[in-house]
Amino acid sequence: MKRKSIMVNGMTTAIFDRLNTLSEPVRVRMLRVLAREELAVGEIARVLHTSQPTVSRHLKQLDGGGWVLRRPVGTATYFRLDADSLPDDARALWSLVQGEVEADALGTGSQYAEDLRRLQGVVAARAGDSEALFRRLGGRWDGMRRELFGEGFVLATLAALLPRSTRVADLGCGTGALLPLLAQGSALVYGVDREAAMLEVAAARTAVLPNVILRNGLLDALPLPDACVDVALCQLVLHHVRELGPVYREAARILAPGGRFVVVDMVAHDREEVRETMGHQHLGFSRDRVAELATGAGLTLQSWRALPPDPDAHGPGLFVAVMGPHPA
Ligand SMILES: C[S@@+](CC[C@H](N)C(=O)[O-])C[C@H]1O[C@@H](n2cnc3c(N)ncnc32)[C@H](O)[C@@H]1O
């Protein structure tokens, strides 16, 4: 924080404030440990072997003078000194004082050496704390993680595993929910859908993503050149498409050599009502049916996996199938 300087008898008071701050040994010791490690109030108290109210009082002055950076974490606040971000005069003074202190710290039985020894203990105890925490939590961590961070970030983690050069086509992208995630990990992402209304939402979602290209078109006549992507993806789309052969062949056509066609859809089920209520053309797909369609398009079914049911979901179960070129 930059402090306003007040002129007193032709001199600015800011430098006197800074000298005043550094004239108190506890504050100097505090700054010295905070230059090495980001600490919470209780930890500083343990390192300096003093009370928390004393630490809080001195921290208030350091904070007010812009000597420390603060970072709130949950209900705690962590403090550190980043000498590089201090104003020039404060940095120069700190460098001078620090030099003196480090020289003193070399003496036997020095208070400064003790501080660093206790600092090591406090940092080591943190690791111990987290080990104990996870031992205690066991299987409850999943719920706690969901509560703290939600579920969405897991998808971003997985998207980051894609090779940076990957080009992806999301066929039947709908409102484009997958596009921002795919765009994070890939070089280029095409979103194709026949419904302008869906593409409008997708366009708003991806407006700031230069590597996403949206195309209005049909899956059996894709508006994309041959061999332009490494992955073609069809998620929750194919049960809507009556004639699947041409769609599989189009997916195979746009795959670059070694590319994969990934289909996520419903496993075969008997909920007839979805034909009426949601216009489904197929009641899911069996593994054999997917393999047959792949073969018809010159591809091989490389893997087919039924996904574990989500306890909150009411629809039929899903599968993920991966298809690639026939082995040479
Ligand atoms: C159920 S939504 C799924 C959207 C998205 N893939 C997802 O997982 O959220 C199906 C989408 O496929 C599109 N679609 C269905 N048949 C299509 C076809 N023959 N050609 C192009 N798009 C099609 C629909 O317009 C719709 O946006």
Image (cartoon, helix red, strand yellow):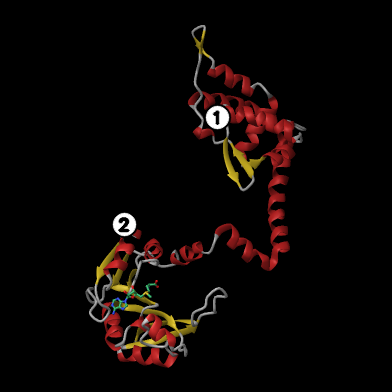
The number of numbered badges drawn on the structure is: 2
Label 2 packing within 10 angstroms: few (<14), some (14-19), many (20+)? few
Marks 1 and 2, the one that precedes in the sequence: 1
Q: SS class of the residue under badge 2? A: loop
Q: Is residue 281 left or right of residue 38?
A: left
71 relative position to 43: left or right: left
Query: Looking at the rendering, in which quadrant would you find the C terminus?
Result: bottom left
Residue at x 63%, y 26% (from the top left corner):
100
* Residue positioned 30% across, 61% down in the render: 203
**Under 8 Å from ligand 1: the CB of mark 2?**
no
The local secondary structure at tag 1 comes to loop
- In whole angstroms, how far apart are the C-alphas of marks 1 and 2? 39 Å
The kind of residue tagged 2 is Ala
| Residue lying farthest to the top in this orientation | 9
Using the rendered image of the protein, determine whether residue 328 is visible from the camera's viewpoint: no
Q: Is residue 127 above or below residue 238?
A: above
Crowd class of label 1 (few under 14; some 14 to 19; many from 20; radius 10 Å): some
Query: Left or right of 132: which side holds 205?
Result: left
Picture layout, residue 180 above or below residue 127: below
Residue type of the residue flagged with mark 1: Gly
Label 1 belongs to which residue? 66
Q: Is residue 257 above or below residue 34?
A: below
The residue to which callout 2 is attached is: 207
Residue 174: percent from the left, percent from the top?
Answer: 34, 70
